[in-house]
Image (tube, grey):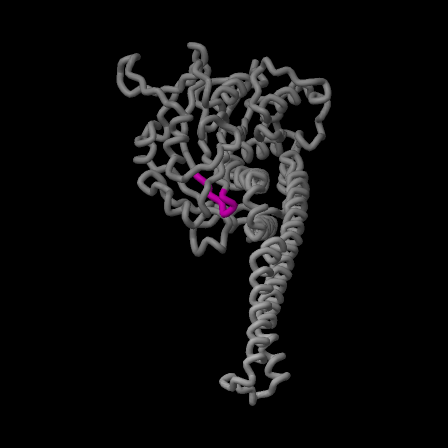
Amino acid sequence: MLNENSVKQQITYLLIPFAFKEDLTKTLKLVNLDVFRQEQDDNAQTHFFDYIKCLVKNEGEIGESIGKKFILDQGGRKRVGLPPNLNTGLSLVVDGEPLAQISITEVSLYLFESQVGFLIFKVFFNGEFNFDQVIQANYYMKKFVQKDIVLSYRIGRLVTDVQEVQLGEVIHTLTESLNVKTFFEGENQKPKQALVYSTTLLKGTISDQKQLNTYLFRARRAFKHSYLPSDSELEASYSAEVLPLFRNSHWGISLEGLANIIETVGVGTEVSETNAFFGGNYSYHIEKAYLYMYILALHQRFGLLHLSIEASEFSKKFDDYIKNPTIQIKDVIHMNLKLVRFKLRSTFTQISNVTHQDKLYANMRKVLKIEELLSELHAEMESLSALMQIAELRENRENDQKKVEQSEKFQRALGVVSFIFLPFGALTGFFGMNFKFTSTENLPNLYFLLSILLIYMVAFFVYWLWIHPKKE
């Protein structure tokens, strides 16, 4: 009898989000083209709107798209410690017990103009296995810091001829040239764990709805069996996190990842065609449509988180802002421009006229809390704008104060000049221009003039040496 959780085909994507320090133009020059090659996302056969298909595009100028994609080539795989052959099997061992045989068939790098990127490992499961083993393997593969997890492959005929693969080190090697600012969840500039996108084609059907919900709970969060779902989780068949798009295709969405469970159903012509589609062409859509859709949704989430991190960093500059309000005004204006650009070019609610794709994308945005993040960022920007208004008022007040001080200085200088030349003007007006200084009969008048000048000079020096400094 066929076990209902036996797996026919399994693909897992490990997604590592990160933010980089430089803008996209500069960061593209930092990509190591000795290990990566540029790749064009082939979305021609998908039903996305044209502008959605062109969002990640290597042709043309950067302004025509919001991101670029790169693929790790065969030589690059060897340099970073991965098996050169795409189909080389790796053994996943946990606590000394073999758990799964896998192959890392592709490593891709996405870089966006928001200064957010994603490193993605595509993992195929080999051999015979069941769904419980898949979920357990996904749980351990996503962790990069546990020491009891060993991933290795054979490099010789002997049992001891094995090469260990440390995914954490591989990620560090692939991203160290990109000036990574944060992995959002990591330690010492190294990622702690990955997001998991898992798609599973079962050999049979899951007859019990409660069991199906349990699988969806564990698969979308990449939780091992010791994580027991609550009753509300098991009853949430039609919540935003659980979406049955077709009778035999079920989606689970969470902050930790995305899962798709496909059942092989019954007998009959229609059923056979359905099974043939999900066993054939559907695998193309999994990567070219649904993975692409998921990356765009994740980009919105982590792009907004990155902007929020940048906004919070302004609090570290308060002392500089107090000293120089102009810096604060420029920073806030620049931040507002970045937010407006991100909203116009990277956040969108419609991507397709296909109903089930539109539903899945809408649920992704809801579960990833895109609108909540936008609202929070708007609130942060309003606070920054309020600070900018305060800075502008302070700067205007300081400018007005400087103008008042300059006016007072000018008035004082004018008063001093008037004070000096006032006696000369008075004497000239009183005696006229025919005053004869050399005549002996005018000596009393000359003494009188000199006495007045002496008094004014003494008064001026008293004012300048004692009264003026006290006013300052």
Q: Which residues are magenta?
A: 109-115
- The answer to whether residue 178 is seen in the rendering is yes
Q: Nearer the viewer, residue 219 or 460?
A: 460
Report how many numbered discs are placed on residues in the image.
0
- Please report the residue visible at 47 percent of the width from the left and 28 percent of the height from the top: 191
Residue 379 picture location, percent across and down: 68, 43
Tell me where residue 355 appears, x and y as whole percent: 66, 43
Instruction: Say if the magenta span includes residue 114.
Output: yes
Horizontal side of 214 relative to 316 (left or right) equals: right
- Give residue 204's position: percent from left, percent from top: 58, 22
Q: Nearer the viewer, residue 85 or 30?
A: 30
Quarter holding the N terminus is: top right
Q: Quadrant of residue 157?
A: top left
| Outermost top residue | 96
Does residue 248 sit above or below 291 in this rendering? above
Whether residue 47 is visible? no
Residue placed most toward the observer, 338 or 349: 338
Residue occupying the far front of the picture: 441
Residue furthest bottom as drawn:
434
User: 42 above or below 257?
Assistant: below
Front position in the image: 460 or 308: 460
Up the image or down, 160 lies above or below 440; here it is above
Image quarter (top left, top right, bottom left or bottom right) of the C terminus: bottom right
Q: Residue 438 in the image: state x and y as whole percent.
A: 49, 85
Is 324 included in the stretch rendered in magenta? Answer: no
Going 45% across and 47% down the picture, which residue do you hit?
A: 24
On screen, 214 above or below 470?
Answer: above
